[in-house]
Amino acid sequence: MPRLARDFAFLVVPSFEGGAHLGSLRLRQYWMNWSGHATHVTVYDVICAFAETGYGEYLIQCVGLIPDSWRPSILPITAAHNQHEYTAEKHGPKPFHLFSEKVFTEVHALVRVPGGDEEAWKAARHRFHMGLHWIPQRLHELELRVRALEERR
């Protein structure tokens, strides 16, 4: 496997967390229906991928909390494929909902490359922690699910 990073890698992907909740409200985020995002990778999927490939040191943050349907990234579920931000002229009316589940715009992941420099990893972790929204209770739940999967192997 070629090494693209020496000490750590920083990944940013659109968030697909809360997709089922949005669907139950007849809503979606605009990228959830892009032909370029056919695989809706969740935090759980990222954790599983890291576990399967042996990357044991990582941090994951969901950022850009979306509390309600008024945000421009939220579209009616009936909007056409490959759309961008909501406009009433293009997408028609959409209902207002306060979300009862967490919905985010992005997922950020910082993963340590095995054998990478310890000081570089510490510095990257410090920068990663500054100013971003953490959901540790959700991550703990997902880590428990990953452990259960690993025990079944």
Image (spheres, helix red, strand yellow):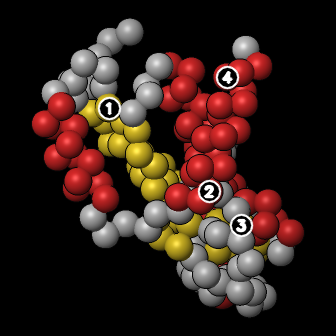
Q: Which residue is mark 4?
A: 150
**Position of 29 compared to 54: left or right?**
right
Give the residue at mark 1: 112
Q: Earlier in the sequence, mark 1 or mark 3?
A: 3
Q: CA distance from mark 3 to mark 2?
A: 21 Å
Q: Nearer the viewer, mark 1 or mark 3?
A: 1
Going from N to C along the chain, the mark reached first, 4 or 3, is 3
**Residue beneath label 3, please?**
28
The quadrant in which residue 81 appears is bottom right
Q: Is residue 150 above or below residue 142?
A: above
Q: Vertically, is 145 above or below 1?
A: below
Residue carrying label 2: 138
Q: Which mark is residue 132?
A: none
Packing grade of label 1 (10 A; few <14, some 14-19, many >=20) is many
Q: Position of residue 104 (x, y in %)?
A: 56, 66
In the rendered structure, are the residues bearing label 1 and label 2 in contact, judged by CB atoms less than 8 Å apart?
no
Q: Mark 4 is on which residue type?
A: Glu
Residue 26's place in the image compared with 138, above or below, is: below
Q: Secondary structure at mark 1?
A: strand
Disc 2 residue crowd, few under 14, some 14–19, many 20+, Cα 10 Å: few
Residue occupying image coordinates x 83% and y 75%: 25
Q: Secondary structure at mark 4?
A: helix
Residue 89: percent from left, percent from top: 65, 87
CA distance separating discs 4 and 1: 20 Å
Q: Amino acid at mark 3?
A: Arg
Q: Is residue 67 visible?
A: yes
Residue at 27 percent across and 48 percent down: it is 125
Mark 4 vs mark 1, foreground winner is 4
2 on left or right of 84:
left
